[in-house]
Image: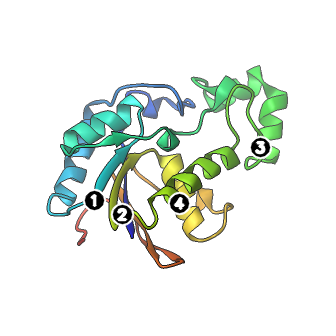
Amino acid sequence: MDIVFIRHGKSMLNGSGCYIGSTDCDMGEEGYRQAEKAKELIKDASFDVVLTSPLKRAIQTAQVIGRDYMKDLRLCEMDFGIFEGLRYQDAVKKYPEYMEKWNADYLNYKIPGGESLNDVYDRVEDFINSLRGVYEKVLVITHGGVIRCALSLMLSNRDHFYRFRVDHGSISIASFDGDYSFIKAVNILSNINF
């Protein structure tokens, strides 16, 4: 099974430097251009199913790609709770004790009102497991954090989250051959063969 991930096009807030995981914002003009490029890259590929995060920036990317899709809540970006909408330096000033705890244990620390990274890993792992044995080729339109979690899970290690670069509009491919999981591609922005 191949899971082809597309990161949504750049949103209106992605350049703001704020935590915007669960914030439901629209794509900007650049995001629409990125979605068009992704559409071109997969134009000749067929998929058994197309699944997307229910957040606007992912839905708008799916609409540009122009294939029938279903929404899946497990594909939402991490909920940064009390940090949502804040820049890092503002979160440090406003919530120094919580930022210290999160920085000390980013995998397990559950941000007040939000999630831990392990919560996101659990969602993504459940999502991937629900696809196995059902589909051969899946297109998933989602967020950078979700894709990084999926790629880390392919390596059977939740500590690789920050080792992957996943640009807006890029394609990454996670694959299974029986019980063996591997990564076929990461952060592709042009010239990919399916």
Q: Quadrant of residue 48?
A: bottom left
The earlier-in-sequence mark between 3 and 4 is: 3
The quarter of the picture where the N terminus appears is bottom left
Q: Are marks 3 and 4 in contact (CB under 8 Å)?
A: no
Distance from the alpha carbon under mark 2 to that under mark 4: 11 Å
Image point 29% across, 34% down: which residue? 60
Distance from the alpha carbon under mark 1 to that under mark 3: 40 Å
Distance from the alpha carbon under mark 2 to that under mark 3: 38 Å
The disc at residue 48 is 1
Image point 67% across, 61% down: which residue? 158
Q: Are marks 2 and 3 in contact (CB under 8 Å)?
A: no
| Residue 164 position within the rendered picture, expressed as x and y whole percent measured from the top left | 53, 60
Foreground mark, 1 or 3, reads 1
Residue at label 4? 129
Q: What is the count of numbered marks? A: 4
Q: Are marks 1 and 2 in contact (CB under 8 Å)?
A: yes
Q: Secondary structure at mark 2?
A: loop
Q: Is residue 31 visible?
A: no
Does residue 157 appear left or right of residue 181 in this picture? right
Image height of 48 relative to 192, above or below: above
Residue at label 3? 103
Distance from the alpha carbon under mark 3 to that under mark 4: 29 Å
Query: In this figure, which colouring scheme has been used for the structure?
Result: rainbow
| Residue 42 position within the rendered picture, expressed as x and y whole percent measured from the top left | 21, 59
The earlier-in-sequence mark between 1 and 2 is: 1
Q: Secondary structure at mark 4?
A: helix
Residue at label 2? 135
Disc 2 residue type (three-letter): Tyr
Disc 3 residue type (three-letter): Asn
